[in-house]
Image (cartoon, rainbow, N blue to C red):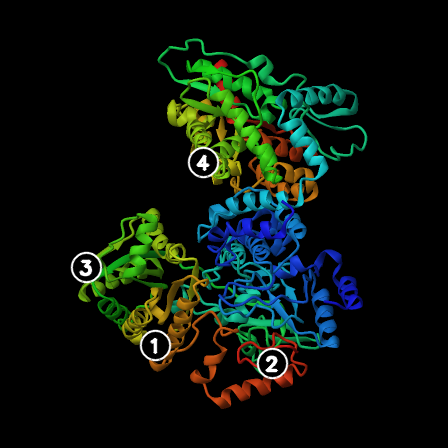
Amino acid sequence: MSNKNLISEFVRILGKENVMGEEADRQAYAYDSAVLPPVVPALVVRPTSREQLSQTIRLCSRHGLPLTVRGSGTNLSGGTIPSSSQSVVVVTNGLNRIIELNARDLYAVVEPGVVTADFAKAAAREGLFYPPDPGSQAVSTLGGNVAENAGGLRGLKYGVTRDYVMGMEFFDAGGELVKAGSKTVKCVSGFNLCDLMVGSEGLLGVYSRIILKLIPPPAAQQAMMAIFDTVETASEAVSAIIANRIIPCTLEFLDNFTIRTVEDFRHAGLPVDAGALLLIEVDGHPAQVEDEAEKVKQICNQNQAKKIQVAQSAEEKDLIWQARRDALPALARLKPTTILEDATVPRSQLPAMVSKIKAIAEKYRLTIGTFGHAGDGNLHPTILTDKRDTEEYSRVEAAIDEIFDAALGLGGTLSGEHGIGLAKCKYMEDETSRATIEYSKRLKSVLDPKNILNPGKMFGGKADG
Amino acid sequence: MADMRELVRMLNELDEDMVQCVRCGMCQAVCPLYAETGRETDVARGKLVLVENLSKEILRDPKAVKERLDKCLLCGSCEAACPSGVKVMDVFLKARAIITGYLGLSPVKKAIFRGFLSNPDRFDGLLKWMARLQGPFSRNINETLGSSCARFMAPVVGDRHYLPIASTAWHKKGRRNFKQPDGRGVKVAFYPGCLVDKVLPRVADAAMKVLDYHQVDVFVPEQIPCCGIPALAAGDRQTFEHLVQKNLDIFDKVPFDYLLTPCATCTATIVKLWPMMTENLPEATRARVQALSGKTRDINEFLVSVLNVGPAGMPTDPGRSVTYHDPCHLRKSLGIIDQPRTLIKAAGGRELVEMKEPERCCGMGGSFNLQHYEISRKIGGKKLNCIAATGADTVATGCPACMLQITDLLSHAGLSVSVRHPVEIYAESISS
């Protein structure tokens, strides 16, 4: 940022230690976890109070400076990459207090920079359960989870972040405080602004406080691993489990390539000749868990499972989930660049989607491992490449286009849980319609007339404020 | 090397390692420094980006990169937790060496490393001189800990509560040759490391007692050069290589089965960093490095894994307990987790009570503590709380640097918890 007076205004609001203007510091906020070109912002600020946050937004608004809010920068769709070289990056990890954790009314009030796993642990200490568990939960912030409507492994039974946001306070584009939702279970006062704000990817406001729902934890769990010869039989088993009115808390899928890669990495004795693995966990009341686990076992058997391993101890359970936790790290080690997609299809279309991904991998001569949340049709085709190899990378880009085409063709969606950001905005009209885009843009232009809130994301367009 | 092109060329040699980072940001969960500051340039992902940008000339400010790269505990928490297996320590240490080569070593560091560290006799002389001075200038603070602080505002010591420097380096008295050069028993060379040698000689005494008890034949040379880590951390490859060479010349002369050290950092440096950072040396030297490195063991690991010292159902006294802090350079660098605990249990007397997050870095980080004392203390504050919460009367850890940091933390908090190396605890049990 060349304007010295402007920088000193930020310093006056935030203190010297929370304003980063040196080039080396700014270059460290030019990226997130998406494989996209970096954009170096003009300034990085780190407010540590609601008041500082409000004044920061007011200052940006007054000077028409675009701002991108960033938690831990683990976004997989480029949502936290600065919109332009004029952008101010607002880091929220200094706003990381759990303000209230109410075990009587089952809610918590948090600041946006609280780390997801820290919050889940704090809830567990009170004997409560916060189910959303995105893969990055050890570092991701709740503000980021809400902005992206993050999911996780428990989506099938427990839903996603949206299902736990009861209310919030956020600053509008002028820095004025807006209140949405409530601490009560029921609340119909006014528009449902809260749901509008969830998944808004920083385009409509800046969260300052979030009210999250907590639930009682399940008393018992049972994990198991079912081995199948083909993706089709595994997928039939998934459908049959749901058709039998059983909703497992987790129902995960690994394809053959992922199984082999994980086994090479961990040597835990996974069946490398299996076509697919299902990792299943049921939870609830102990009697119900016992009953459902038995039924799931029968259903897998009826659907030609080659073998079913039911965890008999905490160690065995951990071993089963270790295979799932290893999927991404094991794949990521094969090649320098890892592109993790999250195209999602109706559950019944899982085999069709898996075979389309396989065909796309062959067509473009690429290595793609597929794993993911079979229970909710949210797959993670993971493309392994080297971004330095420009010829291969152009094939990667073409393959991604086709993966999204395939998902939409099967009645699915571009993104189950990673968001649209920069990476997927060009496909948005394919999933929705021209009118949908126009409607969203009109909404944005009214709520953010100067176009300063994370411009250029979600439906593209002008990014420089 | 004052040529920017040469700097860029050398940094590009790290490209294969740097490109492995997929920017997932999981290092943010484990970095003790980032937990305090929340700044991206303090965590591995940010630092890797800066080195990469410098190598691609996107950033043309080696000084700014060095400043940020140097602000790191080198605890290796990020590397141990990295989902993509990025060799973070390789990149950081090599980048520090390359950039320091370009910018030149600061005059103070140059004086310390090249003038004293690389010359063991002169280094001993300097410390002896400092040991004489410290009496009049410091006052005792805590009996249990044996800590002192400066009577007046000292420029370097500041507000630290430290253990006094020994008047004579331990090895001057401790040097010894094999009793039975041709005997068949296990033969070890003992390498105390500078901190044990000069500040915590009681740890070396305890090690000798234990090794004698187990009838291990021990050799201690009359000169013990530093392992080189302070120089390496500062990017001074010349001093580092000089020290490696000096050590090789001393230890190559004597045949032994293991080189033992009671210092986590020396062990990790010799085992991991020596082979990694001597790639450019002649083949013959590299072979010698590999041989010595392959024989080097942490003393806890040696006693438990080689001599099979184990918990023998030793009784514990009610009301007496000890807790254990995992040094980063044992746990994260070398995977040594159980052996020190086994040794403590084998001693009996005190019950071993685990603290919360025993693997959390104490914040010492060698010279990090000298340059960033306030942050180091803050990071240590979390460790202090974990120790205090156990109610243990003793805290054990297998690293003299951690021992100094924990002593400083406890002394400031006014706690009477004694700080011991597991070998000391085990040695005490032998006499009783």
Which of marks 2 and 1 precedes in the sequence?
1
Q: Which residue in the structure is indicated by mark 2?
A: A462
User: For mark 4, what is the residue?
Assistant: B337
Sequence-earlier tag: 2 or 3 = 3
Frontmost of labels 1 and 2 is 2
Residue drawn at x 34%, y 82% is: A409
Q: Secondary structure at mark 4?
A: loop
Element class at badge 1: loop
Q: Quadrant of the N terminus of chain B?
A: top right
Can you identify the residue that label 1 sits on? A346
Q: Amino acid at mark 1?
A: Pro
Extreme-bottom residue of the structure? A435
Chain assignment, label 1: A
- Indicate the amino acid at tag 4: Ile
**Hey, which quadrant is residue B389 in on the image?**
top right
Q: Position of residue B171 (x, y in %)?
A: 58, 17
Q: For label 1, count other residues whose C-alpha is less than 10 Å away and answer few (under 14), some (14-19) or many (20+).
A: some
Q: Which mark is residue B7?
A: none
Instruction: Give residue B414's position: percent from left, percent from top.
Output: 69, 32
Q: CA distance from mark 1 to mark 2?
A: 34 Å
Residue contact between numbered discs 3 and 1, judged by CB atoms under 8 Å: no
Disc with the residue nearer the chain's start (3 vs 1):
3
Q: Callout 4: few (<14), some (14-19), or many (20+) C-alpha neighbours within 10 Å?
A: some
Left or right placement of residue B356 versus residue B217 in this view: right
Tell me: B376 left or right of A413. right
